[in-house]
Amino acid sequence: MTQEELQKKLRASAEEEYQKFSSALVPGVKNMLGIRLPKLRVLARGMAKEEWREYLSWDCFLYFEEVMIQGMILGYAEAPIGELLQYAAGFIPRIDNWSVNDSFCTTFHAAKKNRARVWEFLMRYQNSHREYEIRVVAVMLMSHFLVPEYIERVLAVLKNLDTEPYYASMAVAWAFAAAWAKYPEETKHCLVTGDGIALDKKTAIRMLQKCIESRRIPEKEKDWMRTERSRIRRRNA
């Protein structure tokens, strides 16, 4: 499939109302067609069975969805993990919004079979101050590394990521909330000190809000979280 053929398929799948809805959720994206995620996944799976390396070489795009598909192809392609990570390193600089970021990270299922290699790769970015490099680390860890043998390391890395950029902070909050639901004792031990939660104010409030909204966290625990959220809001108000 040529890039022109892909663009034609994308235009045929576009929905005007969905475009209005989706573009409001992804600020700054001006070239979104409005295609539902399942349709993009079908296209990406098919392309991953073809000349996917050629598709990943494309670096000039008309549409947001073309970049989204590139990230998904990395999740569906069959190749040695070293090669996939090499392509991932080339793809990450193209990420400029949370939607492409998260679809790439959550689809990258090779991480579950190659955690040691992927962990080593992600640690290249753990000291980054670039918004979407940080978000890649947080969402990858949340999606593929919340397992017993990695949980302590995951929590330590999340705690030290730069949360100044908005979408980095949101990702760290989301990842900690997911960890709290699955490993409450370990997560609370990592975060809660005598002075409160060891995160910046905004990220701590975002994390507590996501925990409170979670169906996997008991109400008794949420009562403490609501109290802590109020205390943090009052602090330095």
Image (cartoon, grey):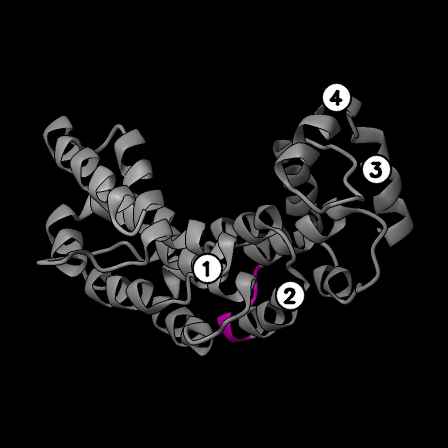
Q: Position of residue 73 (x, y in %)?
A: 63, 54
Which label lies toward us, 2 or 3? 2
Q: Which residues are magenta?
A: 78-82
Up the image or down, 163 lies above or below 207; here it is below
The Cα–Cα distance between marks 1 and 3, rounded to whole angstroms, is 27 Å
Asked whether, in this view, residue 61 is left or right of residue 34, the answer is right
* Residue wearing tag 1: 110
Q: Position of residue 159 (x, y in %)?
A: 29, 64
Would residue 113 be seen by someone viewing this image from the given angle? yes
Which label lies toward us, 4 or 2? 4
Type of amino acid under label 3: Lys
Would residue 39 be seen by someone viewing this image from the given angle? no
The Cα–Cα distance between marks 4 and 2, rounded to whole angstroms, is 29 Å
Asked whether, in this view, residue 39 is left or right of residue 13, the answer is left
Instruction: Specify few, some or many for label 3: CA neighbours under 10 Å numbering under 14, 14-19, or 20 or more.
Output: few
* Residue wearing tag 2: 91
The Cα–Cα distance between marks 1 and 2, rounded to whole angstroms, is 16 Å
Which of pointers 1 and 4 lies earlier in the amino acid sequence?
A: 4
Residue drawn at (32%, 46%) of the image: 237
The secondary structure type at the circle numbered 3 is: helix
166 or 8, nearer to the observer: 166
163 or 219, nearer to the observer: 163
Up the image or down, 199 lies above or below 23; here it is below
The Cα–Cα distance between marks 1 and 4, rounded to whole angstroms, is 34 Å
Which label lies toward us, 1 or 4? 4
